[in-house]
Amino acid sequence: MAAAMLFSVLLPTHDRLEYLRYAVESVQRQDDADWELIVSDNDSTDDIAGFVQGLGDERVRYVRTEGFVPVTENWNNALRHSRGDYVVMLGDDDALLPGYLSGQRALIERFERPDAIYTGAYLYAYPGVLPDAPAGWLQPNLHASFFTGAAEPFVLPRSRARELARAATDFRALYDFNMQYVLVGRPAIERLSGDGDFFRSPFPDYYAMNLLFAEAERIAVDPRPRVVIGITKRSYGFFHFNRREKDARALLATDGVDPEIRRDLAQIVLPGTNINTSWLLAVEALYRRLDRVADMRPNYARYRRLQALYCEQARHLHRMISRSELRQAEAGLAPAERALLRVFGPILGALVRVAPASVRRAGATVFGRVVGQYGRAKQPEREIGRYRDIIEVLDRLEPAPRSPAPSR
């Protein structure tokens, strides 16, 4: 008879009760009953406590921070209050697909308790969120390089996993870093936490996921979508795609940076997108956690080039960056790079502004491939405008009843 095994679903939240309800429902729909759900409330004004109490389900546990804290601290708060053998992080605008836990249990037994299981996912943009897709959309997200040609679950070679983590330190995302993609075993969490927290840096998923890929003994991969990652009007993705950098930073309260790292990188950090800078802070924290091993050293020069390119685009296409910020970013480049950017940046910007939308999209695709920051394959087919919310997505993908009472 198989040993009992408890799953922990971590659900950090802040003032998004309208979406949190759906995330909780997706867990309650699971056909495997041995789970706990930790709702970690980051000082919300919404009545999250009343909602949880009204569920009448002892498996759903409510904890609250003493005040508003950075997203990383809230993630660690949820983790500290969990006790499951395996742990998955779920955003409050995300959902587990029906059968997620029972499917993961089968894979844990099949692969003899791997450190982690990395799965495919769907992306779901709510209507009215993205400026280029006002009707919203649903699409599979299987761009990770190791999904190519895979139809059945398998164990990722350890050398390949570390190679992917190394690519992240070169500011190349060859797989998705969001923690929703991975179920992590408690022993791996405890070992990788070392003498600190499992989640670190302003982007805790960029840190923890790459730490896992760099150091885990065995990672199983399930190429089938198992979760739905939501993009709502109150998500980081919304602020990013709508070019609202300040709101994106405020959402995560990204000021919680290790003081030593902040001091050491003061001369490296440049104006530009918060994604690149928080990515830098995450891989710097990873580099130090791994005792500064040479192959995990962040590529500071590439970071500076990426920020300068972003500033050039933001200045000449969207008027989002001041001239002084652009010049500060350009100062980090080699003389030849700086000269090319200053000559061709304004010319390309002027041409793009008058080009048709189809040409702009094609140009952005070519530019992305040249820069090579995201190793995405061909855009998957999207279902446009069919779903009002993430529950309709779940009902369409696989309707399922609520889970039975716990077996213990």
Image (cartoon, helix red, strand yellow):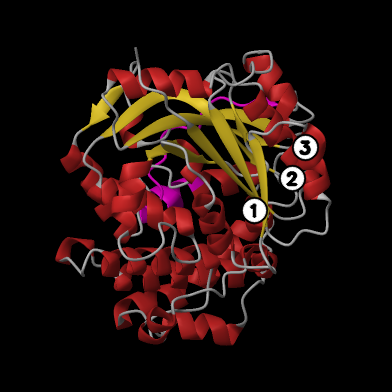
Residue found farthest to the front: 408
Residue type, label 3: Pro
Residue range highlighted in magenta: 365-384
The crowd level at tag 3 (other Cα within 10 Å; few <14, some 14-19, many 20+) is many
With respect to residue 180, does 206 lie above or below?
below
The crowd level at tag 1 (other Cα within 10 Å; few <14, some 14-19, many 20+) is few
The crowd level at tag 2 (other Cα within 10 Å; few <14, some 14-19, many 20+) is many
Does 55 appear in magenta? Answer: no
**243 lies left or right of 83:** right
Which numbered tag is attached to residue 223?
none
Distance between the Cα atoms at labels 3 and 1?
14 Å
Residue 289 position in % (x across, y down): 28, 66
With respect to residue 323, does 175 lie above or below?
above
Residue type, label 1: Phe
Which numbered tag is attached to residue 241?
1
* Label 1–label 2 contact, CB within 8 A: yes
Q: Nearer the viewer, residue 283 or 138?
A: 283
Asked whether residue 298 appears in the rendered view, the answer is: no
Please name the residue shown 32% across and 20% down the image.
109
Residue 230 position in % (x across, y down): 64, 39
Which numbered tag is attached to residue 129?
2
* Label 3–label 1 contact, CB within 8 A: no
Does 379 appear in magenta? Answer: yes
User: On the image, numbered disc 3 is attached to which residue?
Assistant: 127
Quadrant of the rendering where the N terminus is positioned: top left
Residue type, label 2: Val
Distance between the Cα atoms at labels 2 and 3?
6 Å
Circle 1 — which element?
A: helix
* Label 2–label 3 contact, CB within 8 A: yes
